[in-house]
Image (tube, helix red, strand yellow):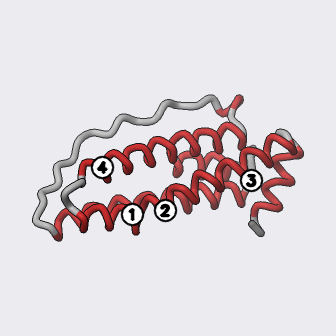
Amino acid sequence: MYMAMGHFFDRDDVALKNISEYFKECSEEEREHANKMIEFHNKRGGTTTYFPIKAPGSFDPANFNTIKAMNCALALEVNVNKSLLALHETANGDPEFQDFIEANFLHEQVDAIKKLKDYITNLKLVGTGLGEFLFDKHFKSS
């Protein structure tokens, strides 16, 4: 989802370069998280089984904007946080795994959720159109 949004904002008819880069970086970060989880699993002798991943719902580019993208990202991060908390609870008798989840994921999730909420608040204040353009220009320095 992050990669798709990154490329959406990179289109010549959208042209919000800094927002595009942000979502592309988010995509890379999530890929790194998946690799870190798999490496930890393998290190402990686990076998990884891959299942098909349901594609995220498509979006209508004519009705898509930065606020909607940030809300999608927030929903995703909140869902991931809930899954990580459930995984942490499942690992009740495994302090090493709990520590791994806390150190590598949980604190970062809370920070990401806060940052996205801040972005959404700022975007609501400036609005779409010119507001998104100005947000994108400021976004580079944030």
Q: Which residue is mark 2?
A: 107
Q: Earlier in the sequence, mark 3 or mark 2?
A: 3
Q: Which residue is mark 4?
A: 89
Tell me the mark number nearer the camera, choosing from 3 and 4.
4
Could you tell me which secondary element the residue under label 1 belongs to?
Answer: helix
Q: Are marks 4 and 1 in contact (CB under 8 Å)?
A: no
Q: Residue at x 59, y 55 (%)?
A: 23
* Residue 62 higher or lower than 83, as above or below: above
Mark whose residue sits in front, 2 or 4: 4
Distance, label 2 to label 1, CA atoms, is 6 Å
**Between discs 2 and 4, the one toward the N terminus:** 4
Estimate the x, y position of residue 74 in percent, counting from the top left.
Answer: 58, 44
Q: Secondary structure at mark 3?
A: loop
Which residue is denoted by mark 3 in the rendering?
16
Circle 2 packing at 10 Å, graded few (<14), some (14-19), many (20+), is few
Q: Quadrant of residue 70?
A: top right
Rendered view: 11 above or below 39: above
Say whether marks 3 and 2 touch (CB < 8 Å).
Answer: no
Q: CA distance from mark 2 to mark 4?
A: 15 Å
In this rendering, the answer to whether 90 lies above or below 58 is below
